[in-house]
C-alpha cells in the first residue's frame, strides 16, 4: 500500500508555479487573485487564510473582499462586475457557503469565465463536460493531478465517485471520463452501494460522512481517494474512508488530512497562473 501524499505533491507543484510566476513578472504580468467572502463563517476564514498564504508562497498577489452577512444580491453582483473589469485581477473566487438569502449560482454566473479560477461558471462547467480546455473545479483537478503523480492508470478502469455535488462529485465524473475511465456515481438514493464499490478499481469519496467507506466495501488493490473533511465530536478531522482498515486492502490511498486538501489549494494557484498566462 502506498500513500497518495498530497502535501508533497502540492509542494512540488507550487515550486513549479513559483518559476512560472517569475517568468510572467519578467513579461510585466503579476498574477493576482481576488477572494470574496460573505459573512463570518469560521471554516471559510481558515480556508481564505490558507489561500492567502499559498498566494504569498507562489508570488501571486492577493486581495480580499469581506462583505457583511446582510449585503444584497445586487451589491454582490456589482462587486463581481467591478472585479471582472479590473485589468490587474486575473482570478476571482467567491468563497462558499454564502448566506441563504443570496443566490450563489447567479453569482458564479456573473464571474467572467476567463477569471473563474474555481471553475463554477456554467461556461467552464460546460466546456469541461465536452472535453474543451477550461478552468476545472480545484478539488477534482487536484485528485486527477495526485493520481497522475503516482502513475495511477485511469484509462479503461472502473471508477466510482461517491457524491454528486456541483463542487466535487459532478466535475470529478467529467474529469475521470475525460481520462477514459468508466464511471459510476453513487449518492444518497443509490441502492446497494457496497455492491458497486466492490467492483471499483478506483474510488473517489466526496459525501461528507465520517468513515463511511469500510474495508468490506472494497476489493483488494483498489485505489482510494478521500475528499471528505469531517470533524468528529472530539474535534478530530476524519475523512469519508475508514483509513485504518481500508488501507490494508488498497494499493494506493490518500490520507485525511494531508491528501486532497493541499492539492485543492495548489490547483487554485495553478488556475490563477493559467488565467494570467491567458492574458499573454
Image (cartoon, rainbow, N blue to C red):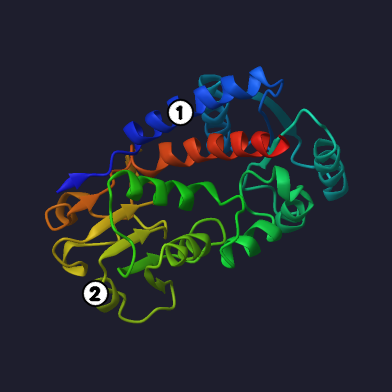
Where residue 57 appears, as percent x and y from the top left, is: 51, 20
Circle 2 residue: 199
Q: Which label number is shown at residue 6?
A: none
Asked which secondary structure carries label 2, the reply is: loop
Left or right: where 246 falls relative to 53? left
| Mark 1 → mark 2, Cα distance in angstroms | 37 Å
In terms of depth relative to the viewer, which is nearer, 251 or 63? 251
What residue appears at the point 72 percent right and 20 percent down from the top-left corner? 28
Left or right: where 279 falls relative to 253? right
Image vertical order of residue 14 relative to residue 275, above or below: above
The number of numbered badges drawn on the structure is 2
Split into 4 quadrants, where in the image is the C terminus?
Answer: top right
**Circle 1/circle 2 CB separation < 8 Å:** no
| Label 2, residues with CA under 10 Å away: few <14, some 14-19, many ≥20 | some
Where residue 247 appears, as percent x and y from the top left, is: 17, 52
Q: Earlier in the sequence, mark 1 or mark 2?
A: 1
In terms of depth relative to the viewer, which is nearer, 259 or 58? 58
What residue appears at the point 17 percent right and 67 percent down from the top-left corner? 219
**Quarter-wise, where is residue 132 in the image?**
bottom right
Where residue 243 appears, as percent x and y from the top left, is: 22, 50
Circle 1 residue: 16
Farthest residue, direction bottom: 191
Where residue 209 appears, as percent x and y from the top left, is: 37, 58
Amino acid at each position: 500500500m502506498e500513500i497518495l501524499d498530497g502535501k508533497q505533491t502540492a509542494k512540488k507543484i507550487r515550486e513549479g508555479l513559483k518559476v512560472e510566476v517569475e517568468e510572467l513578472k519578467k513579461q510585466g504580468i503579476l498574477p493576482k487573485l481576488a477572494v470574496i467572502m460573505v459573512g463570518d463563517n469560521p471554516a471559510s476564514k481558515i480556508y481564505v487564510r490558507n489561500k492567502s498564504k499559498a498566494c504569498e508562497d507562489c508570488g501571486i498577489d492577493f486581495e480580499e473582499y469581506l462583505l457583511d452577512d446582510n449585503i444584497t444580491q445586487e451589491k454582490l453582483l456589482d462587486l463581481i462586475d467591478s472585479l471582472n473589469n479590473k485589468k490587474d485581477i486575473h482570478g476571482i473566487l467567491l468563497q462558499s457557503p454564502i448566506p441563504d438569502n443570496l443566490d450563489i449560482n447567479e453569482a458564479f454566473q456573473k464571474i467572467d469565465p476567463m477569471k473563474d479560477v474555481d471553475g463554477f461558471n456554467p461556461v467552464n462547467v460546460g466546456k469541461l463536460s465536452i472535453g474543451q480546455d477550461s478552468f476545472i473545479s480545484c478539488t477534482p483537478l487536484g485528485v486527477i493531478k495526485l493520481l497522475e503523480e503516482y502513475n495511477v492508470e485511469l484509462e479503461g478502469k472502473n471508477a466510482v465517485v461517491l457524491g454528486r455535488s456541483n463542487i466535487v462529485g459532478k466535475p470529478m465524473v467529467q474529469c475521470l471520463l475525460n481520462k477514459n475511465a468508466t464511471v459510476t456515481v453513487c449518492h444518497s438514493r443509490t441502492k446497494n452501494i457496497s455492491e458497486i464499490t466492490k467492483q471499483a478499481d478506483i474510488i473517489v469519496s466526496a459525501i461528507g460522512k465520517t468513515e463511511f467507506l469500510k474495508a468490506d466495501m472494497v476489493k483488494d488493490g483498489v485505489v482510494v481517494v478521500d475528499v471528505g473533511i469531517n470533524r468528529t465530536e472530539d474535534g478530530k478531522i476524519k475523512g469519508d474512508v475508514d483509513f485504518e482498515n481500508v488501507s490494508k486492502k488498497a494499493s494506493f490511498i490518500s490520507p485525511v488530512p494531508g491528501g486532497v486538501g493541499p492539492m485543492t489549494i495548489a490547483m487554485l494557484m495553478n488556475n490563477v497562473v493559467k488565467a494570467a498566462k491567458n492574458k499573454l
